[in-house]
Amino acid sequence: MKPGAGVEDRIEARIRRAWDGQPGGALRIASAAYGVIAGTRNLMYDSGLLACRSSPVPVVSVGGLTAGGSGKTPIAADLACRLGAAGVPTAILAHGFEDEMDVHRRLAPEARVYGSRSRVRLARQAAVDGAQIIVLDSGFQHRRLHRDLDVVTLDVASASSRPAHLPAGPFREGLAALSRADIVVVVRRTPAGDASGSGMAEPIPPRLRAFREAPDAPPFVSARIQPGPLVAANMSGGHLDRPHPAVAVAGVMWPEAFFAQVRNTVASEPETVSLRDHARIDASLGDRLRDMAGASGIVCTLKDSTKLVGVLGESVPIWYLSEKVIWEGQGSSPIVVRAALALLDPHAFNLSEGPPA
């Protein structure tokens, strides 16, 4: 058993294995019930039986169909950065997980980050604090807060998998829910330095292609998420010019994707440790990771870096693998950014062109 594998970790690992194979009867029944509940809830919002609450300023939701791994957090942070660079005071609303909020603070330092499940209250507070636009991270299913622009991210690997609802599969909603989107961002994770991306010219799964080619389909755009260099998370890591970490730690929904990026980035072959998404790293787990890593150190996700440094301090070198978003075939101003700016001034920002210099 790998370090940190408690009861909840083992349950999650068993469910994930079922996603790759044939789920049992109990998971299929639970999945069917989940689908019915989610569908009923959406119908209630569509019919007005459940009311959406408005925000004093425009809201751009960046969400996904799956439970994680669709790239919505880096896409949301990239959007917030670009809005800030355009001179627009921007707020990011997140679930309230501290690790997730810390990621946004690092990736979009000019934006003000708020976290709570009460997104309506946060939106109103952000407007009072001076925000002119709000980016709602992981917001596609959070329909209580009205959004002016719905951006849905969908990882190519997820679109290729069996579209089963939780817990038999990773989907919160099926592909039919894309009809609610204003823009669909198809996300691919590629190795560092891969410049071969050709946008939507690359073959995509047949099911997704059918939605893209429908007469009333929203615009489909493509983005790559590539790993960047290792970044020192503590001073011990900063003292080493050529990191050769012995351990790779990932507390994300799809840890194997992260480990693949690590193997393509570092010269070493680190031992991998998978944790639950938003897992807590306590002193006991920290001690085991320290013993495994030794002086060679740990490479982790940005989301896990603050928690690891908080437990391990300077006792072991720690780095996180940086990431960058590359928009394909859209020039310097992606349509997502132009559409968000158009909410503020439709006359100044034409969706077919970039914002004025």
Image (cartoon, rainbow, N blue to C red):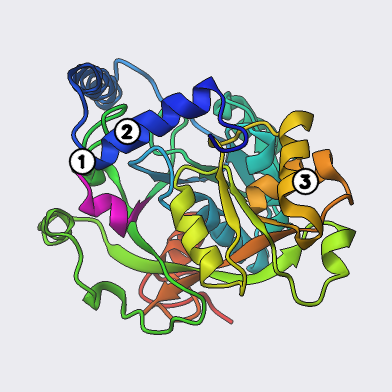
Mark 3, residue position: 290
**94 shown above or below 341:** above
| Residue drawn where x is 47% and y is 62% of the image | 260
- What amino acid is at disc 3? Arg
Crowd band around label 1 with a 10 angstrom C-alpha radius: few (<14), some (14–19), many (20+) = many
Q: Are marks 1 and 3 in contact (CB under 8 Å)?
A: no
Q: Is residue 121 left or right of residue 72?
A: right
Q: Which mark is drawn over residue 163?
A: 1
Q: Secondary structure at mark 2?
A: loop
The boundaries of the magenta stretch are: 153-162
Gap in angstroms between the C-alphas marked 1 and 3: 39 Å
Residue 326 counted in the magenta span: no
N-terminal of the pair, mark 2 or mark 1, is 1
Visible in this render: residue 328?
Answer: yes
Q: Which mark is drawn over residue 51?
A: none
Mark 2, residue position: 172
Residue 315 in the image: state x and y as whole percent.
Answer: 88, 49
| Residue drawn where x is 72% and y is 44% of the image | 289
Residues 12 and 159: in front is: 12
Q: Quadrant of the C terminus?
A: bottom right
Q: Quadrant of residue 295?
A: bottom right
N-terminal of the pair, mark 2 or mark 3, is 2
| Residue drawn where x is 24% and y is 75% of the image | 202
Crowd band around label 3 with a 10 angstrom C-alpha radius: few (<14), some (14–19), many (20+) = some
